[in-house]
Image (tube, rainbow, N blue to C red):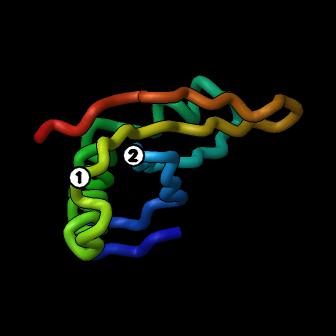
Amino acid sequence: RARMPACEMDMVVRKRRMLVFVEVKARRTQDMALESVTPQLRKRLEQAANQWVSRRHGLQQHLWRFDIVMLAPGKLPRHKRDAWRAQV
């Protein structure tokens, strides 16, 4: 977890030159989990990612992507890679 003034990010993963900001949502269904990542939440996550990267000079040249992991009872987790791109 990474707590920033804009909001809390569930996971930040670095894979080579890519930073992956992962939002994990658990709801009654996976579709409900996906729908809970609203445009407003996406904007807050993008702001938090900007804040996080700005404090880590060695990572400022990395590419970014935002993923969502959806959890629902009785289902395997579903991972939506590159769910959206930051509006920079």
1 or 2: tag closer to the N-terminus: 2
- Which type of secondary structure does the marked residue at label 2 adopt? loop
The answer to whether 3 is drawn above or below residue 66 in the figure is below
Which percent across, then down, holds residue 73?
82, 37
Is 14 above or below relative to 77?
A: below
Tell me: 79 left or right of 50: right
User: Residue 10 location in percent, x, y?
Assistant: 53, 59
Residue 59 image position (x, y, % from top left): 31, 61
Q: Residue at x 66, y 45 (%)?
A: 26
Instruction: Please name whichever residue, 88 or 75, is drawn nearer the observer in this view of the structure.
Output: 88
Describe residue 2's horizontal placement relative to residue 40 as left or right: right
For the image, the number of numbered tags is 2
Q: Amino acid at mark 2?
A: Arg
Q: CA distance from mark 1 to mark 2?
A: 8 Å
> Residue farthest to the left?
88
Q: Is residue 12 left or right of residue 54?
A: right
Q: Position of residue 18 (x, y in %)?
A: 40, 44
Per the image, the residue denoted by label 2 is 17
Callout 1: SS: loop
Q: Which residue is mark 1?
A: 61
Amino acid type assigned to the residue bearing label 1 in the image: Gln
Q: Tell me, yes or no, whether the two marked residues, 1 and 2, touch with CB atoms within 8 Å.
A: yes
The residue at the point 70 percent across, 36 percent down is 28
Q: Residues within 10 Å of mark 1 (few under 14, many from 20)?
A: few
Q: Nearer the viewer, residue 31 or 1?
A: 1
